[in-house]
Amino acid sequence: MSLLRDRMERDMERAGLAPRTRYSYILSIRLLAKFHGRSPDLLSAEDVKAWDEDLGRRGLSPSTRHIRLAAVRFFFRRTLGRPEVVSGIVLPRRKRRSLPTVLSPQEVGCLLAALRASRYRAFYALIYDTGLRFSEALHLKVGDIDRRRGVIHVRQGKGGKDRQVKLGERLYGILRDYWREERLGKPMAEPPSKESFLFASATGGRLSRMGARYALHAALKETGLAKRVTPHTLRHSFATAQMEAGTGLPVVQAQLGHGSIRSTQVYLHVSTRLILQAPSPLDALAP
């Protein structure tokens, strides 16, 4: 399995699959091999069908079955070059996701004000003002801030894609103040360079995921907001604010780094302002 795994890893990397997806695909192929007790490259279409039926009998969610079968299709089509083995496999429909939680500008302001450390305040202000994913913000380098052009370069985002997002004047001021206070005003193990992480620990390494999440949780408790808020909530709030400001759907898609515009369209349903702007048919009736 080790050689097959290496081949599949290379194929997935070339296809631009995210690390989490690659991990799930490898796990799925291991489970397939374990189910039949032999190497997966020796399996037939009937073997794959039997495993698919077993997944259904065990009552797995449509999302879990989807990822398991997508992994098998990738493995036989791309890595082994045997598409006929999975020609009869149909991916189950995933359940429609519930609408994302969003914060109003006033709620975001309260949350940011409750973040005591300037590094975390700047970090979450950036996510809200640009719509970056949590991991994308964590991996930003100093050289990714392009003040002259007014953009932030996002390197190797989801799917291994690069993109640019707008660097607003107020956000730049927040980042500048954070940099002066946290990075230039304190002794560092190494002097910062363009390759240094923008948000870094005291030793110059990347900001701790756990620390950033804990800071947000503590600020949320202090504000008393009765909503379940995660770092991704600020990304949702950014997208909704963009839609309500009249930004075109393709522009919002590009800023978020969505591969499909269908992923962006969900924010049409979240925007209260757009809903309230819709005409009421009863109002058009003659009195």
Image: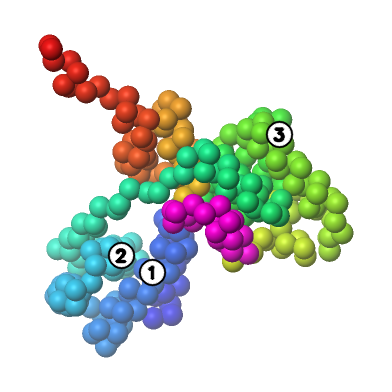
Q: Amino acid at mark 2?
A: Ile
Q: Amino acid at mark 1?
A: Ser
Q: Residues within 10 Å of mark 2 (few under 14, many from 20)?
A: some
Could you tell me which secondary element the residue under label 1 belongs to? helix
Which residue shows up at 29% across the image and 53% down it? 97
Residue designated by label 1: 24
Residues at marks 2 and 1 touching, judged by CB atoms closer than 8 Å = yes
Could you tell me which secondary element the residue under label 2 belongs to? helix
Q: State whether residue 67 is above or below residue 3.
A: above
- Quadrant in which the C terminus appears: top left
Q: CA distance from mark 2 to mark 1?
A: 7 Å
Instruction: Give the label on residue 138, or none.
Output: none
Per the rendered image, the range of residues in magenta is 211-231
Q: Amino acid at mark 3?
A: Arg
Which residue shows up at 17% across the image and 22% down it? 281
Instruction: Give the label on residue 147, or none.
Output: 3
Q: Where residue 276 sits in the image (x, y, percent)?
A: 32, 28
Would residue 232 be visible to someone looking at this image? no
